[in-house]
């Protein structure tokens, strides 16, 4: 059985998905058409499996949480999963480049592939793909839109001044 629910947030209405044990997706409404797995008859709308995720996302948006601690399962290719795992190591309020992630994976010429994998991240915000920027320091593509990426980075920068 797969579950889903919606959460209103400052950046967009979020769709959360779960297999009943793990959080499997956090999608901004703009991303739903592009990234969401096809919902079939085994999907059920139910907020109960998301109590922890909802509480932690609300605390994050309130500036009260800087590190998520949730059971998650982001499913992709081995390369995508390696990229997503490396994203979880980017500290709150900091940014790194696609090139830096590629180098961390010992694939220094794979910055574009890192960008593609970053764009397929199914658990946005919690797996912080918004913290990855261009090597020149510019904000580049974000599935939720650059203005949402800007908001998330500004939100984290504002909160780090108090911690």
Image: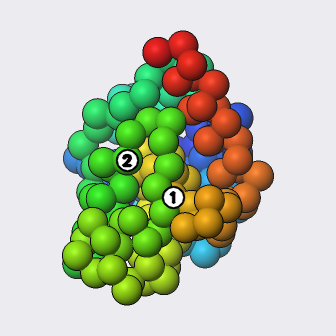
Residue 15, percent across and down?
Answer: 56, 50
Is 40 on the left-hand or right-hand side of 147? left
Label 1 sits on a secondary structure element that is strand
Which residue bears the numbered disc 1? 132
Is 2 on the left-hand or right-hand side of 22? right
Q: Are marks 1 and 2 in contact (CB under 8 Å)?
A: yes
Residue 119, percent across and down?
Answer: 52, 71
Which residue bears the numbered disc 2? 90
Residue 44, percent across and down?
Answer: 44, 53
For the point 24% across and 43% down, the residue is 71
27 or 140: nearer the eye? 140
Label 2 sits on a secondary structure element that is loop
Residue farthest right in this picture: 147
Residue 109, percent across and down?
Answer: 37, 86
Q: Is residue 36 above or below residue 57?
A: below
Q: Is residue 41 above or below residue 132?
A: below
Disc 1 to disc 2, how far (Cα)?
A: 9 Å
Task: Kindly indicate the quadrant of the structure image that contains residue 140.
Answer: bottom right
Crowdedness near tag 1: few (<14), some (14–19) or many (≥20) residues, C-alpha within 10 Å:
many
Q: Is residue 132 above or below residue 115?
A: above
For the point 57% across and 61% down, the residue is 133
Is 23 on the left-hand or right-hand side of 151? left
44 or 57: nearer the eye? 57
Whichever of callouts 1 and 2 sits on the residue coming sooner in the sequence is 2
Residue 17 visible in the picture: no
Crowdedness near tag 2: few (<14), some (14–19) or many (≥20) residues, C-alpha within 10 Å:
some
For the point 55% across and 67% down, the residue is 135
Q: Is residue 144 above or below residue 23?
A: below
């Amino acid at each position: 059985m797969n579950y889903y629910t919606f959460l209103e947030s400052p950046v967009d209405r979020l769709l959360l998905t779960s297999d009943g044990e793990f959080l499997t997706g956090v999608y901004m409404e703009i991303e739903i058409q592009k990234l969401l797995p096809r919902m079939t008859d085994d999907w059920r709308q139910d907020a109960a499996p998301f109590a922890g995720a909802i509480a932690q996302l609300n605390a994050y948006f309130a500036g009260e949480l800087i590190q998520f601690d949730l059971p998650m399962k982001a499913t992709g290719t081995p390369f995508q999963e390696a990229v997503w795992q490396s994203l979880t190591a980017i500290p709150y309020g900091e940014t790194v480049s696609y090139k830096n992630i590629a180098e961390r994976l010992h694939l220094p010429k794979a910055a574009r592939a890192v960008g593609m994998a970053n764009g397929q991240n199914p658990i946005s915000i919690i797996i912080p793909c918004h913290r990855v920027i261009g090597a020149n320091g510019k904000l580049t593509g974000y599935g939720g839109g650059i203005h949402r990426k800007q908001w998330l980075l500004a939100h984290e920068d504002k909160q780090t001044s108090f911690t």
